[in-house]
Image (cartoon, rainbow, N blue to C red):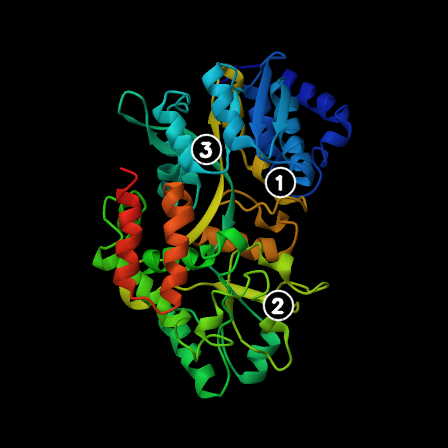
Amino acid sequence: MKHVLFAGVAVAALTAGLANAGSHLPFNPGEGDFNWESYEAYAAATDLGGEQVTVFGPWLGPDQVVIESVLAYFGEASGADVKYVGSDGFEQQIVIDAEAGSAPNVAVFPQPGLAADMARRGFLTPLAEGTAAWMAENYAAGQSWVDLGSYTGPDGSQSFYAFPYKADVKSLVWYIPENFEDAGYEVPQTMEELKALSDQIVADGDTPWCIGLGSGGATGWPATDWVEDMMLRTQPPEVYDQWVTNEIPFTDERVVAAIEDFGAFARNDDYVAGGAATAASTDFRDSPKGLFSSPPQCYMHRQASFIPAFFPEGTEVGANGDVDFFYFPSYEGKDLGSPVLGAGTLFAITSDSPGAHALIDFLQTEIAHEVFMAQQAGGFLTPHTGVNTDLYVDDTRKALGEILLNATTFRFDGSDLMPGGVGAGSFWTGMVDYVGGKDAAAVAAEIQSSWDALK
């Protein structure tokens, strides 16, 4: 809901408010190449008159500082009194608060599955009419994001409940540019070229891939990311969606084929540093180390955008750095576009109020994204096509953002959307068994049995 305020008064109030905001606002109006026009237009149309807007989410530490700065701009522009609380127990606490009738106005969900469950139980308020249409128009692969935030309500009808904001990219391959240059290799543009490059590296007497599936009690999850990426590269997105909800079972031949497509990489002794048998016992945090050895133990490593945290200290990431990345490519012959697998957070209204809707309106402005983009903490990426990508904090973030903007389809990590006993259970262990030599169809049948047992 928007409350009209005389434009001249609003701009004057905006300038005065910003001047008095102090350290909460890292960038002054007119500073840099931000879209201040979107900010001023929002302020001119919005007056919450001191209404308190409470926000609860998973961000703590440096991430909390950044999101509070974004919310501070919302408060200054709208006249709202904004309060943010972060918690590492968000998933449990938000359910407790909703059931007790004490939910915040807005909750920031790191998992769409939880948001969907709360919408079904009647704990979420549908977003304003036109919000879904705005997202379809202004986000790259916009319908994918609308689908991510659309759930069935208590009356059985579908509505757009959750606004995706801040994304992560998983469809990445990491490599050492100098190693590629020395060997005469080029970055592959298609899956066919990626497989041909892998074969060429083997023919040259080297090993193309480092793969590690170990993660303590969560061992196996890196393999599920591979399979999800292969599903998106071999099947239309609607088939991926049917698989994630078990509308088609794990035993479906298309799912088994995607598992086997992963196996073409991970079960090939010539492809994996140390041999395929070492993949399950190698911790995912250690698996990139082979890229940096001399001579290199491997030339490529598929992992999400967070993996540089486990690179050797002092490693510079980027086109001119020590290590770089490229998009995990799609099959040219399958004509499925450029799908991206990832994760992200979603803003949803858990206690309806004018201020809650006004905050969702604010998230549609370019400035709400650009302020986060330009700060180091949080690893912010956005599919908003209207932002100035030069404002990303560094070239690495900008390059990751470009992958999002070039995506034709975006899908959330499938294992995170499945029931915990499957997505964080039998799917993990099944992939370890598969890489260890078990038949793909047999593994798929066991995973499906675990799902059937939950019904």
The residue lying at 47 percent from left, 65 percent from top is 280
Q: Amino acid at mark 3?
A: Phe
Residue topped by disc 3: 163
Tag 3: Cα neighbours inside 10 Å, few (<14), some, or many (≥20)? many
In this view, 143 is above or below 438: above
Comparing 357 with 5, the one in front is 357
Distance, label 2 to label 3, CA atoms, is 34 Å
The quarter of the image holding the C terminus is top left
Question: Which SS class for mark 1?
Answer: helix
Give whichever of 233, 213 is nearer the camera. Answer: 213
| SS class, disc 3 | strand
**C-beta proximity under 8 Å, tags 2 and 1:** no
At label 2, counting other C-alpha atoms closer than 10 Å, the crowd grade (few under 14, some 14-19, many 20 or more) is many
Mark on residue 323? Answer: 2
**Residue linked to disc 1:** 372
Q: Amino acid at mark 1?
A: Phe
